[in-house]
Image (cartoon, helix red, strand yellow):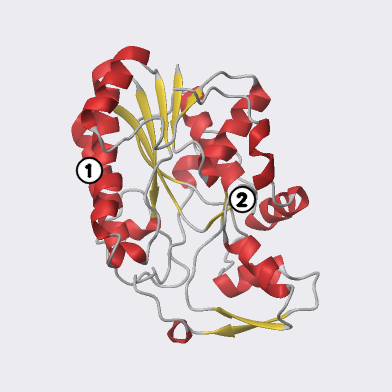
Amino acid sequence: MILITGGNGQLGTELRYLLDERGVTYTATDAAELDITDKAKVDAFFDEYKPTVVYHCAAYTAVDKEEGEGKALGELINVDGTRNIAQASARVGATMVQISTDYVFGGYLPIGEERFPDDAKHPESEYGRTKDLGEQAIVASGAKFYVIRTAWLFGSYGPNFVFTMQKLAESHPELTVVNDQHGVPTWSRTLAEFMTHLVDVNAESGFYHLSNDKKKDEDVTWFDFATEILKDTDTVVKPVDSSAFKQAAKRPFNSTMNLDKSKATGFVIPTWQDALAQMMAQGDLRADKNKIKGDTSK
């Protein structure tokens, strides 16, 4: 049995649609069906259904809230919940696919350089800290695992930067977007396809990085991303530095990821511009979730 945790989130929904298209059966859960922070319930679920693959999409991702009121909840979900899933996966022999983040890295990375999967981690936010501890819990569990670090996620099934920019453009002739945070956007469809690809090809267990691809020597900022999103509108996008937006959590200066290890598995990664064009052609599909076929009754 294939299990998807966090099945109603942006990535979980994307993954469910992908598996439906392929005719693959699975069970998807959210907090109401499986409280991952309750070890006894997780153990009972795994003992009963014995999943062979676990796509662990459940996470606490309120980055700024986790610096304050959400700190305890972030620890509970991202650390304890991930540990519970990992230990249960190890016990029943399931392969665990975990989604992690560029926030586990800290410090200054010069523009033009990239983060590799084995780079040292020094998280500088609560979100990065709890996701790092979740990674460590997976390794300690002894389960076969794939940890995929990603960044700047966008897609058709949840609130994200693309929809935010499009909505603001409806009422604002001019927008300002930061141009001193560097990285590459990730389409949730590309990420979902890579998650299943690692399992399908029985790739080497370990850490992988996945964003969409970029052109050689291309430097991408949130300003560039916004400009591409709104290029066919009359809205003018202007660059500003991060000091214009006060945020509780420290953002990575450069989270551009090296994709060589992921490409070496045979996975073809589209550019972020091509991925964005495909996603925008689909539009906002959040209202279509009831078309998903997978079993969510557990």
Say if 243 sits above or below 167 in the image: below
In this rendering, does residue 32 appear at all? yes
Picture quadrant of residue 266: top right
208 vs 79, nearest the viewer: 79
Q: Residues within 10 Å of mark 2 (few under 14, many from 20)?
A: many
Mark 1: which amino acid?
Gln
Residue displayed at 38% across by 46% down? 59
Say if 27 sits above or below 167 in the image: above
Q: Residues within 10 Å of mark 1 (few under 14, many from 20)?
A: some
Residue displayed at 63% across by 60% down? 215
Q: Which residue is mark 2?
A: 155
Picture quadrant of residue 204: top left
In this rendering, does residue 106 appear at all? no
Mark 2: which amino acid?
Gly
1 vs 116, nearest the viewer: 1
**Residue 221 in the image, given as x and y percentages of width and height:** 55, 71
The quarter of the image holding the C terminus is top left
Residue 24 appears left or right of 108: right
Sequence-first tag of 2 and 1: 1
Element type where label 1 sits in the image = helix
Element type where label 2 sits in the image = loop
Q: CA distance from mark 2 to mark 1?
A: 28 Å
**Residue 270 in the image, given as x and y percentages of width and height:** 64, 47
Q: Outermost residue toward the left?
A: 140
Say if 175 sits above or below 139 in the image: below
Residue displayed at 30% across by 45% down? 77
19 vs 208, nearest the viewer: 19
The quarter of the image holding the N terminus is top left
Q: Which residue is mark 1?
A: 136
Picture quadrant of residue 161: bottom right
**Residue 253 in the image, given as x and y percentages of width and height:** 41, 72
